[in-house]
Image: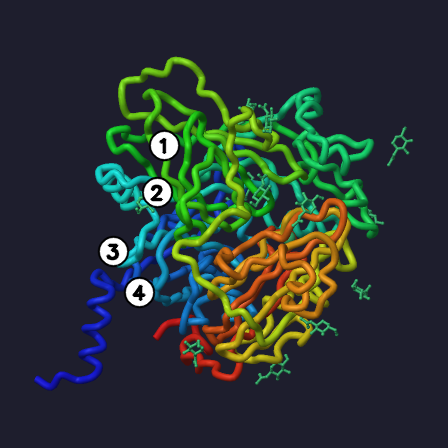
C-alpha cells in the first residue's frame, strides 16, 4: 500500500492524541417553569436540566455540539475559553459569527479541544445567560502536559493521590440567580433608566436558598467602603445598594416609580435544596473545577477548616497556591485540590458576594464518607460580607499568580488601542471604546460574512501574526471590577494602575512607571478584571497575539453591562480570513 503524506499526518495526529475521538453532544433547549432557590419562574433547560449536562472530553477530541432550540425565542451558544482555532463560525456570537438559531431550528457547532482544563458553555444571545443556559465543559489533559504538582509535594504516594484526584475532578457551577427573567430585567432597565445590579440568590450547582437578613444584621455587616459609597443611605432589604446613588448610576434621568419588585428591594425568604459533596478521605485529595456562571456578582468560595491548592485558572496550570478562600469573577474557572485531612464530618461550603454592591450568600455541605468524628458546626474562614472570619484566613492574592509553564509575550507590539469603559448616555448603557454596542446589532449580518455590517467605531481590525495592546481605561465614578472576556485565544495581563493612562503606548508608560508592568511571567487568561474604580479612574493593560483569523468579540461578563453595550468586535487577521463553509454561511451548520 502506498504510504501517502496524509497517512503519515494521520499517524502523527494519532500519536499525539492517543484517545482523539469525535464526541457528539446533542442539547435540546426548552423554556419551562422551574423552582430555583425556592422560587418558580421560567428557566432555559438543557435536555430538561438546569444547569446543563456536563460535556466531558479528552484533549484533542473533536466536538459536534448540536443545539436544538425549542424555546419561544432565538438563541446561540458560546464555548467560553475555547479558542476555536480554524473554526471561527462555531464561536456562537449572533451578528458576529452566526445568525441566531430560531425557534424549532438546530445548529451544529464543530470545534476541536486543543486545550485542556475547565471551561463552560453558555447562551450568548441578549441576556439569556441569566435565564440559566449554562453548563460545564471539562477537557482531561493529555498525559504529555507537564503538571505543577511537585510544587505541592515530592512524596510519591501523595503525588499519585493528586493525579488520581485530578483524573476524578468534578465541575462545580457557581452562579447568582434573579427572580426576574432576562427580558423582564431589560424592560425594567429601559423603563427606569437604571443599571439593575442586584441578584436574588446565589447557587451552587443550581441549588440554593434565599435568606432575608434582619435590618440590624445588614447594617452591622455593611463595611466602611460600602458606607463611603452609601453616604446617608443603607443597603436595601436584599442587601443591595439602593437605586438612588449618583456615584453608582451617574447623572442620568431615572424613573424610580417604574422599578419592579425584586430588582432592588423586596426580600422573600425561600428554601431550595442544598448541594452535598461527598468525599472519600482515603483518597487524600479531592479536586474541584470552580466555574463562575455568575451574571452579576463576583463570588468568594471557601470550605470551612480546609485548605485549597489552586492549581489551574481559566483551564491552564499555575504555580499552585495554598489558600482558604478565593474570589472568582464572572466566567473565570479556578481548579482546586482540597486535602482531606480533617476529622471526618460535615463541613460547610460557603459562597458569598465579593462585590461591594450586594451582601448575599449561600451554603453547601462537604461530607466525609466515614464515621463522623466532628460533632460540632464547622468553623468558617469567611464572613458573609466577604471579610475574613479569622486572623489566619488566606485569600488567593490574584496578583501573585504565575502561570505554569510560563509563556512570555512579545516585548514589542504592532498596535495599541485605548478603550474607554463607562456609562454611555444612560445608567444602563455602557461603552468599551468610543460607542455602545446596541443589542439590536445581534440581528445584523454576521461580521464573519460581511465586515461592514455594523458601524466601524464598534470594531477593531488586526492583521494576522501581529501583537496588540488593549488598554482598558475605566472612567469614574464608582465602577465595580469589570471581568473583561476576550473570545478566541487567551491574552496576557501585563499591567494595571490607578489614574488615567496618559501615554500613547505601553513602552512609553514603562519608561515612566516600570513597576506597574510585568512582561516576565504575566498571567495568561481568557477573562480578567479591571481594577475597581472607587476613588477615581483605573486602567488595565492586556497584550495578545493575533493567531486565529476570524470575527470575535471582547466584552464585559457582567450581563447587564454586556447587554448595555460594553462589547467590542475584534476582526482578527483580516488579511488572511478563511472561507466560511457554505453550510455555516447560508444554513445551520450542517454539512
Ligand atoms: C409558568 O408559570 C407561570 C405562572 O404560574 C405561567 O404564567 C406561565 O405560563 C408558565 N410557563 C410555562 C412555560 O409553563
Ligand atoms: C520537589 O522537588 C523539586 C526538585 O528538587 C523542588 O524544586 C521542589 O521545591 C520540591 N517540592 C517541594 C514541595 O518541596
Ligand atoms: C446626609 O445627612 C446629613 C445630616 O442630615 C446632611 O447634612 C448631608 O447633606 C446628607 N448627605 C447627603 C449626601 O444627602
Ligand atoms: C414612570 O413610570 C411610571 C410607572 O411605570 C409611569 O406611569 C410614568 O409614566 C413614568 N414616568 C415617566 C416620566 O416616564
Ligand atoms: C447566609 O448566611 C446566614 C448567616 O450566616 C445564614 O443564616 C444563612 O443560612 C445563609 N444563607 C444560605 C442560603 O445559606
Ligand atoms: C482579619 O484580618 C485582619 C488582618 O490580618 C486582622 O487584623 C483581623 O483581626 C482579622 N479579622 C478577624 C475577625 O479575625
Ligand atoms: C498581593 O501581592 C502583591 C504583590 O506581591 C502585594 O503587593 C499585595 O500587598 C498583596 N495583597 C494582599 C492583600 O496581601
Ligand atoms: C454588508 O452590510 C452592509 C450594512 O448593512 C450592507 O449595506 C451591505 O450591502 C452588506 N454587504 C453584502 C455583500 O451583503
Ligand atoms: C476611538 O476614537 C479614536 C479617536 O478618534 C480613534 O483613534 C480610535 O481608533 C477609536 N477607537 C475605536 C475602537 O474605534
Ligand atoms: C489603587 O488605589 C487603591 C486605593 O485607592 C489601592 O488599594 C490599590 O492598590 C491601587 N492599585 C494600584 C495598582 O496601584
Ligand atoms: C496566523 O498567524 C499564526 C501565528 O503566526 C499562524 O500560526 C497561522 O497559521 C496564521 N494563519 C493564517 C491563515 O495564515
Ligand atoms: C445622543 C447623545 O447624547 N450622545 C452622546 C452619548 O455619549 C457619548 C459619550 O459620552 C457622547 O459623545 C454623545 O454625544
Ligand atoms: Cu462590566
Mark 3 or mark 2, whichever is nearer to me: 3
- List the residue tagged with mark 2: 170
How many angstroms separate mark 4 from mark 3 (CA)? Answer: 18 Å
- List the residue tagged with mark 3: 143
Q: How many marks?
A: 4
Q: Can residue 550 be seen in this view?
A: yes
List x then y, in percent, for residue 480. Answer: 67, 47
Q: At 20% across and 62% down in the image, what residue appears?
A: 18
User: In the rendered image of this protein, does residue 516 appear above or below residue 410?
Assistant: above
Q: Quadrant of residue 354?
A: top right
Q: At 55% across and 74% down in the image, what residue appears?
A: 446
Is label 2 in a helix, a strand or a loop? strand
How many angstroms separate mark 1 from mark 2 (CA)? Answer: 10 Å
Horizontally, is 109 left or right of 424 in the view?
A: left
List x then y, in percent, for residue 135. Answer: 42, 49
- List the residue tagged with mark 4: 62
Which is nearer the eye, 137 or 192?
137
Is label 1 in a helix, a strand or a loop? strand
User: In the rendered image of this protein, does residue 379 appear above or below residue 331?
Assistant: above
Q: How crowded is mark 1: few (under 14 residues within 10 Å), some or many (20 or more)?
A: some
Amino acid at each position: 500500500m502506498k504510504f501517502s503524506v496524509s497517512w503519515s499526518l494521520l499517524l502523527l495526529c494519532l500519536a499525539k492524541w492517543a484517545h482523539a475521538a469525535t464526541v457528539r453532544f446533542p442539547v435540546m433547549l426548552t423554556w419551562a417553569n422551574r423552582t430555583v432557590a425556592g422560587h418558580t419562574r421560567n428557566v432555559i433547560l438543557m435536555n430538561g436540566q438546569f444547569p446543563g449536562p456536563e460535556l466531558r472530553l479528552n484533549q484533542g477530541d473533536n466536538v459536534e455540539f448540536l443545539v436544538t432550540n425549542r424555546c419561544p425565542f432565538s438563541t446561540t451558544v458560546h464555548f467560553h475559553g475555547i479558542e476555536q482555532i480554524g473554526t471561527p463560525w462555531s464561536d456562537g456570537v449572533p451578528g458576529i459569527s452566526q445568525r441566531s438559531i430560531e425557534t424549532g431550528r438546530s445548529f451544529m457547532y464543530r470545534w476541536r479541544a486543543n486545550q485542556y482544563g475547565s471551561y463552560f458553555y453558555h447562551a450568548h444571545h441578549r441576556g439569556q445567560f441569566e435565564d440559566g443556559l449554562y453548563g460545564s465543559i471539562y477537557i482531561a489533559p493529555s498525559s504529555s502536559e507537564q503538571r505543577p504538582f511537585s510544587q505541592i509535594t515530592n512524596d510519591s504516594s501523595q503525588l499519585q493521590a493528586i493525579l488520581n484526584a485530578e483524573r476524578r475532578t468534578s465541575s462545580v457551577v457557581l452562579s447568582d440567580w434573579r427572580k426576574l427573567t432576562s427580558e423582564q430585567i431589560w424592560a425594567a432597565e429601559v423603563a427606569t433608566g437604571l443599571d439593575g445590579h442586584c441578584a436574588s440568590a446565589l447557587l451552587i450547582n443550581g441549588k440554593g436558598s434565599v435568606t432575608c437578613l434582619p435590618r440590624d444584621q445588614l447594617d452591622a455587616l455593611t463595611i466602611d467602603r460600602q458606607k463611603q459609597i452609601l453616604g446617608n443611605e443603607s443597603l436595601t432589604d436584599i442587601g443591595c445598594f439602593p437605586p438612588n446613588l449618583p456615584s453608582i448610576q451617574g447623572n442620568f434621568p431615572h424613573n424610580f416609580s417604574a422599578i419592579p419588585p425584586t430588582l432592588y428591594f423586596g426580600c422573600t425568604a425561600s428554601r431550595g435544596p442544598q448541594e452535598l459533596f461527598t468525599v472519600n478521605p482515603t483518597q487524600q485529595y479531592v479536586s474541584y473545577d470552580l466555574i463562575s456562571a455568575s451574571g452579576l456578582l463576583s463570588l468568594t468560595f471557601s470550605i470551612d477548616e480546609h485548605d485549597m491548592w489552586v492549581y489551574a485558572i481559566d483551564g491552564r496550570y499555575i504555580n499552585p497556591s495554598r489558600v482558604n478562600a478565593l474570589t472568582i469573577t464572572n466566567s473565570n474557572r479556578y481548579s482546586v485540590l482540597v486535602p482531606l485531612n480533617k476529622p471526618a464530618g460535615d463541613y460547610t461550603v460557603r459562597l458569598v458576594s465579593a462585590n461591594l454592591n450586594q451582601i448575599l450568600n449561600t451554603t453547601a455541605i462537604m461530607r466525609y464518607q466515614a464515621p463522623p468524628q466532628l460533632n460540632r458546626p464547622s468553623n468558617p474562614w469567611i464572613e458573609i460580607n466577604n471579610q475574613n472570619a479569622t486572623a489566619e484566613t488566606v485569600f488567593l492574592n490574584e496578583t501573585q499568580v504565575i502561570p505554569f509553564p510560563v509563556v512570555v509575550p512579545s516585548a514589542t507590539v504592532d498596535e495599541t488601542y485605548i478603550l474607554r469603559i463607562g456609562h454611555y448616555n444612560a445608567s444602563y448603557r455602557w461603552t468599551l471604546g468610543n460607542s455602545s454596542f446596541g443589542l439590536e446589532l445581534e440581528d445584523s449580518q454576521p461580521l464573519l460574512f460581511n465586515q461592514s455590517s455594523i458601524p466601524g467605531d464598534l470594531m477593531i481590525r488586526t492583521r494576522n501574526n501581529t501583537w496588540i495592546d488593549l488598554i482598558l481605561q475605566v472612567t469614574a465614578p464608582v465602577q465595580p471590577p469589570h471581568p473583561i472576556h476576550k473570545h478566541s485565544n487567551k491574552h496576557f495581563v501585563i499591567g494595571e494602575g490607578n489614574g488615567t493612562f496618559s501615554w500613547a503606548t505601553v513602552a512609553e508608560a514603562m519608561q515612566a512607571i516600570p513597576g506597574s508592568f510585568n512582561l516576565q511571567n504575566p498571567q495568561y487568561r481568557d477573562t480578567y478584571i479591571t481594577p475597581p474604580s472607587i476613588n477615581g479612574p483605573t486602567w488595565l493593560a492586556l497584550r495578545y497575539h493575533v493567531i486565529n483569523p476570524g470575527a470575535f468579540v471582547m466584552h464585559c461578563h457582567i450581563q447587564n453591562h454586556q447587554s448595555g453595550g460594553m462589547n467590542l468586535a475584534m476582526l482578527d487577521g483580516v488579511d488572511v480570513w478563511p472561507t466560511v463553509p457554505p453550510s455555516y454561511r447560508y444554513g445551520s451548520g450542517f454539512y
